[in-house]
Amino acid sequence: MDGNGRWARERGLPRTKGHYEGLTTAKNIVRAASDAGIQYVTLYVFSTENWKRTADEVGFIMGLVKQFLRNEMDFYRENKIRVRYTGDQAGLSPEIWKEVDDVMQATKDFPGLQVVLALNYGGRDEICRAMRQICRDRASPVPTTGGGTPPVITIDDISAAMDNPDIPDPDLIIRTAGEFRTSNFLLWEAAYAEYYISDKFWPDFNPEDFSQALHWYQHRDRRFGAIGAAA
Ligand code: FPP
């Protein structure tokens, strides 16, 4: 959800105003995704690197997270939307984690769109936590020298240790504000995702733009390393 700051600067407004408008866009896009019958949407709300911003900006974004969770409960209930989490919860304040956890519990049986909040999320951090989890589960660290066969760690083992192993890899990643970079988002899961870059700043991105991204995606020839249908 990139470009909130630039959207605000262009209008001579504080960056926080851009995030505020960005929250409205996030709600509109979640609604559009739900209406389109999409099963999973992950919103990259706050990265493990975003703590480098001013305390004011960080506090403001966390306040918006609360609004997204609390004020939308009726909408989640009506549309059977399930809210989930990815990231390092240990780095969140207990207050924010309780807000996230309360809504996750309240929506856990809803069968509709699953909205995953990536909050204090980093792709490298997620892979690191998964590897630590695998080592812990196997009760001994992976040996680097000496005799014996080192335990084999497979791609499936790592996928199974990620934050939400039941959620399929993303098909489509939409990035706004014209930036062509991954910014540490779903590094493991995005191996074969299609990237759609919109020049619009996130607060200007609307359901029509979202629909265009879906149409673009529908015409992609996804080969997953094999030979394409056309060939
Ligand atoms: C990136 O734009 C945006 C963020 C780091 C914050 C995203 C947060 C929201 C949209 C509000 C909360 C949303 C939900 C769903 C709880 P930027 O600030 O880096 O923009 P810039 O690159 O133009 O400065």
Image: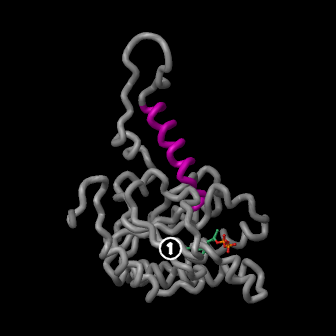
Q: Is residue 10 visible?
A: yes
Image spot of residue 89 (x, y percent): 58, 53
Residue type indicated by callout 1: Ile
Residue 218 lies in the magenta-colored region: no
Judging by the rendered image, the residue that carries numbered circle 1 is: 197
Residue 120 lies in the magenta-colored region: yes
Horizontal side, residue 229 vs residue 62: left or right: left
Please say which color scheme the image uses: one colour
- Give the extent of the magenta segment: 119-137
Horizontal side, residue 139 vs residue 45: left or right: left
Image spot of residue 15 (x, y percent): 74, 78
* Nearer to us in this view, 180 or 38: 180
Residue at horizontal 71%, vertical 83%? 8
Q: Residue furthest front?
A: 231
How crowded is the residue under tag 1: few (<14 C-alpha within 10 Å), some, or many (20+)?
A: some
Residue at horizontal 48%, vertical 42%? 130
Horizontal side, residue 70 vs residue 55: left or right: left
Q: Quadrant of ligand 1?
A: bottom right
What main secondary structure does the magenta stretch of the protein show? Answer: helix
Number of numbered tags placed on the structure image: 1
Image spot of residue 48 (x, y percent): 63, 55
Residue at horizontal 44%, vertical 89%? 208
Q: Is residue 83 visible?
A: no
Position of residue 183 relative to residue 24, above or below, is above
* Nearer to us in this view, 182 or 158: 182
Name the quadrant containing residue 12: bottom right
* Nearer to us in this view, 126 or 208: 208
Residue at horizontal 79%, vertical 65%? 54
